[in-house]
Amino acid sequence: MTDVSALGGIGEYGRNCFLVMDQATNTRIMLDCGVRNGNPEVYPPITETIAQSIQTVFISHVHNDHIGALPLLAQKGFTGDVWMSEASFRQLSAILGKWHDPLINNLHFRSFAKHTRGQAISFTEDFSITWGYSGHMLGSVWYSLQLREKSIFFSGDIVLSSPLLVTDMPDKDRYEYALIDSGHAAQIMPYKRSLTNILSAVNDSSEKYFLPITISGKTCDLLFSLFQALPDRPFFIDEPLYEHINSYLHYPDNLRPERRERLQAMLQSKRLAISRQFEGPGIYLLENKPEGCHEINTNLYQGIDSFFYKSHPDKQDLKTLIRKVFAKKYIFFHSKQHDLDHILQDLSQYNHP
């Protein structure tokens, strides 16, 4: 018998953490181990029994709502392997230093070799896993698990059409379970419409416009897209963002090949500058708002005319995903409960081909 249970992530935005248990193969693994961001953070209910019974953890990407409970997992006694992509592994060192928990050293962090992308990797005679890029951020991946004759798909956070990052799709299309990111599936916002809305709001070249950001795939996509669409405007960013998007060039397998030259050109352009305190008109993508800027909030959805820029599947993306990934049972995560209710009601009217 194969069972998937959620320790978080269902009916809430964050705390993504799932257990996969298969009696026939004696397999117990964890998919992501995150917290719900806030003050205080909210942790999944990981007990010593859970922590000490699982064999392996697979991480989709290194956002806090997918890895922030790893210190708790270590405190409860887990000492096994934690697997992720190479790009995620390289970003992890900066995060480990912020946790200030010596028990995290009991975990064994591992990265998949790049050449294993799309290939079945055997962990036991009865259990294998395949991974592919999910387009959400540098290093983010989905997983396809094979437990004898049973298959499980875990999308992690997924973006179907990032202008910079590759999104793979699994070869297999029939699963026992499919755990699918539905973070923005209560909305409809095509990327072209979103960019049109934002560009209409930053149309005065004599003004300063501020887009609040975090270091994420969404921010890198926005910077790249706006930079291409506004060829005569200066852009100002924080140094951590510059370093992060520059690191894309070190992972060409994760980067859309037709975008590489344009990305290099942007990073070398005099129109892109590390922000200082006093700057002139232009587009500011920063963590903190400078004085005298018009703010453009790309996180708040207020209808099809808003400046919202999605970083998860919207309603149409979700339908595309379930056409590709057919399962006997779906588990939708990363949506607040009222959005999840709306999503489930809408999808109940949808028949898989």
Image: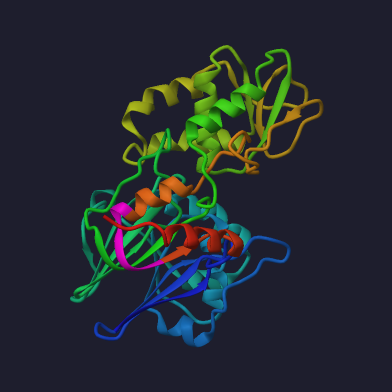
Magenta residues, start to end: 323-330
Residue 178 is situated, as x and y percent measured from the top left of the image, at 35, 64
Q: Quadrant of the C terminus?
A: bottom left
Majority secondary structure in the magenta region: strand
Residue at the (31%, 40%) spot, across then down: 253
In terms of image quadrants, where is residue 15?
A: bottom right
Colour setup of the view: rainbow
Classify residue 80 as left or right of residue 43: left
Task: Return the x and y of residue 48 as percentages of the image width and height.
Answer: 52, 86
Q: Residue at x 65, y 42 (%)?
A: 302
Residue 349's place in the image compared with 257, above or below, is below
Q: Nearest the camera: 27 or 82? A: 27
Residue 38 in percent (x, y) is at 69, 61
Q: Residue furthest right?
A: 291
Q: Is residue 135 among the parts visible in the rendering?
A: yes
Residue 304 part of the magenta segment: no
